[in-house]
Amino acid sequence: MLVQEALGLFVTQLEADGRSPHTIGQYRRHVGALIAWAGPGRVFREIGHEDIARLLSAPAARTRPDGRAKKATSMNAMRSSVGQFFRYAHEAGWIASNPTRLIRRAITGRPLPRALADGEGARLLAAITDERDHALFTMLLGTGIRIGSALALDAADVDFERHEVLLRRAKGDRVERVYIPKAVAEVLARHLAGRRDGRVFTGIGARHAHRRLRHWLAAAGIARAASPHSLRHSFATSLLRKTGDVLLVQKALHHRNIESTLRYAALDDARVRAAIEA
């Protein structure tokens, strides 16, 4: 079987496993780089572990389209994708052994979450003059929900009496309830103006939200690079500073694994300094 043919079957398996389009796209790119390097007519039995090592050492694999070197984390993602592809091929019986069995991930430090600095969240919201954008980014900063969950919200999912929203599109297709502070609820109520059906935030998608956020950051005079997900990080960082309770932050973010939440603890150097000085 040709590697090119196997990629199509691998993608079908990923879809059957419920992997997200983003994840599948990443596998396509990484395995596609292997196919481009090896040639579309290459068959599995011709690829050995030496070939995989040459691929991952080649400039084509280690260089970004702009000519700069890829980060170690990006290379680790490619190692994982290629490894999963050949593991699947081996378990499917197409190859006698897995040529990626000797590949090891590079040791890297986990990047710190990119959050807004103290005061920048308030500056951002003060600069937003568009009513919909103000409501959207107020909600992201005030609740920490993901942009996909926010954009999927229906007006009927907002419970103003209980100060809760029902997230029907949380990560992993989970359904979750999230508390919304009084100030955020007031902004949402003004935005909805009594409307009880239809999407809360209309006329905007995830990419458009990224562009709108960049626009309002510039309007607020904030040069820091940020995305809608940065507002989730800002919420988590602020909540940890106020409470000092990592488990509470884990619950607020609906993290399944505490390791995901402990990233924010590494940001709070001020509390470490204060404790040592006390």
Image (tube, rainbow, N blue to C red):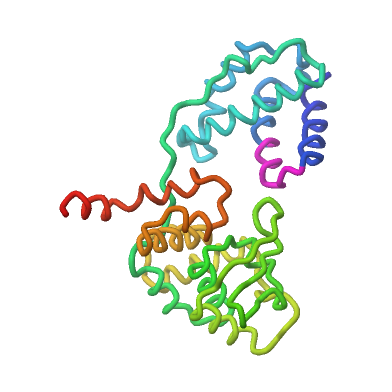
Point out residue 72 in the picture as x, y percentages from the top left corner. Answer: 47, 32
Compare residues 8 and 272 and report the one nearer the observer.
Answer: 272
Q: Quadrant of residue 169?
A: bottom right
- Compared with 63, 266 (above or below) is below
- Which residue is at a point 61% across and 17% down the rendered structure image? 52
Point out residue 9 in the picture as x, y percentages from the top left corner. Answer: 82, 31
Q: Would residue 139 appear left or right of 113 to someone viewing this image?
A: right
Res 202 visible: no
Q: Would residue 145 appear left or right of 28 to someone viewing this image?
A: left
- Which residue is at a point 48% across and 68% down the rendered structure image? 141
Find the magenta span and give its range: 18-28
- Which residue is at a point 51% across and 32% down the rendered structure image? 63
- Compared with 176, 76 (above or below) is above
Magenta stretch, main secondary structure, is helix
- Compared with 272, 188 (above or below) is below
- Which residue is at a point 63% across and 18% down the rendered structure image? 100
Res 144 visible: yes
- Looking at this rendering, what residue extends furthest in the bottom direction? 194
Total of numbered circles in the picture? 0
Compare residues 236 and 203 and report the one nearer the observer.
Answer: 236
Q: Quadrant of residue 51?
A: top right
Is residue 19 highlighted in magenta?
A: yes
Compare residues 177 and 87 and report the one nearer the observer.
Answer: 177
- Compared with 56, 8 (above or below) is below
Q: Would residue 269 appear left or right of 107 to someone viewing this image?
A: left
Is residue 55 highlighted in magenta?
A: no
Q: Quadrant of the N terminus?
A: top right
- Looking at this rendering, what residue extends furthest in the left direction? 277
Point out residue 278 in the picture as x, y percentages from the top left corner. Answer: 16, 54
